[in-house]
Amino acid sequence: MIDKDAPNISTSPPPETTMPYVLCRSIVKVYRVGESEIVALRGIDFAMTKGEMISIIGPSGAGKSSLLNLLGGLDTPTAGKLIVDSLDLLSLKGKALADYRLNRVGFLWQQVERNLIPHRTALHNIDLPMLLAGVPPSKRRLRARELLEMVGLANQADKLPSQMSGGQQQRVALAVALANHPQLILLDEPTGSLDRKTAGQVMALIQDMRKHYNLTVLMVTHDLNMAGFADRVLTLRDGALGQDLSHVTDSSPTLDSAGRITLPELVRAQLAEAPRIGVEIRPEGVLLRPEYDTIDSHILGGKLLPQDAAPKRKRFRLFGRTNATATQKLG
């Protein structure tokens, strides 16, 4: 459900550049468990421009966190090409890779224990990445207090994480992520443990920081409402990206007063040969799925519809009607 009272965040795409800031080409990630192989990512292809924000939505186990780990330099792909700010991540080793993780990319996780050290105050948590990067003490203190001011927590500098609310913890965690001036920020369900009002405030703060520092932001989430803050929304299922349908067009399905859906020709063509059509409600929307008496995974896989994505913020078109408080998707 899209919150009609959510802040009016501009979703206009940033100006295009000649070279993508983030480039993923044919990214495959395979994990070996015993004698078995688990394919987490199946040929991921996408690009981001400098200053853009993309949300990726999908169910648990779809491969969202695996993709973040690769872009964050925490893991390496089995195959493919991965470029961030002209750096070939597959070629980074040792100190160069550690420097990338420390200075070029920032992380914001859902779990507070991954963001903040419990026995360090807010100020000292923000100070730590700069200490590891060799920043002089005077510059560390100045930067830490500047960031606390920007996230609205200047009066919480001496508080431990356990003494702060969930929203305050995430604000401090955002300041930690920005301590060493990274230009790429990776968000893994950053509002998953927050109530709706606090989540909206944290996302609005992320947008403010993104604009102030010209950050490139990639977020993975289950929450369509939070995903709507991004310039583009992509779907990920079974390790593969779905179609980008962030901008609804006149070819969208329509719903009449009797509840009958008229599907576009492209969708009808995908479903035409199926004897039955299954309807499944999922976290990211509603899936129409062709069903066969004898399931052939190779045939069925080719007929699955691309998942839909969250609409622009504030208002969107729902099956031909303008609606600001409900969401229905074709998956």
Image: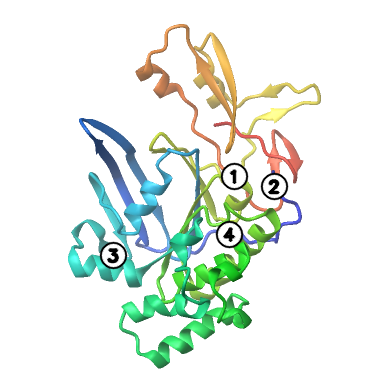
Task: Report, in whole angstroms, how far the alpha carbon at label 3 lies from the one at label 2.
Answer: 36 Å
Q: Are marks 3 and 2 in contact (CB under 8 Å)?
A: no
Residue lying at the far bottom in this picture: please name it: 138
Residue 111 appears in view: yes
Instruction: Examine the rendered structure and indicate whether residue 88 appears above or below residue 330.
Output: below
Task: Report, in whole angstroms, how far the alpha carbon at label 4 lies from the one at label 1.
Answer: 15 Å
Q: Is residue 8 left or right of residue 241?
A: right
The residue identified by callout 2 is: 2
N-term-proximal mark, 4 vs 3: 4
N-term-proximal mark, 2 vs 1: 2
The residue identified by callout 3 is: 86
Q: Is residue 157 left or right of residue 239?
A: right
Looking at numbered disc 3 in the image, what kind of residue is underneath it? Answer: Ser
N-term-proximal mark, 3 vs 1: 3
Looking at numbered disc 2 in the image, what kind of residue is underneath it? Answer: Ile
Secondary structure of residue under mark 3: loop
The residue identified by callout 1 is: 310
Label 2 CA crowd tier, 10 Å (few <14, some 14–19, many 20+): many
Task: Report, in whole angstroms, how far the alpha carbon at label 2 lies from the one at label 1.
Answer: 9 Å
Q: Are marks 2 and 1 in contact (CB under 8 Å)?
A: yes
Q: Which mark is residue 12?
A: 4
Q: Quadrant of the N terminus?
A: top right
Name the one closer to the observer, 16 or 64.
Answer: 64
Instruction: Examine the rendered structure and indicate whether residue 329 appears above or below residue 13.
Output: above
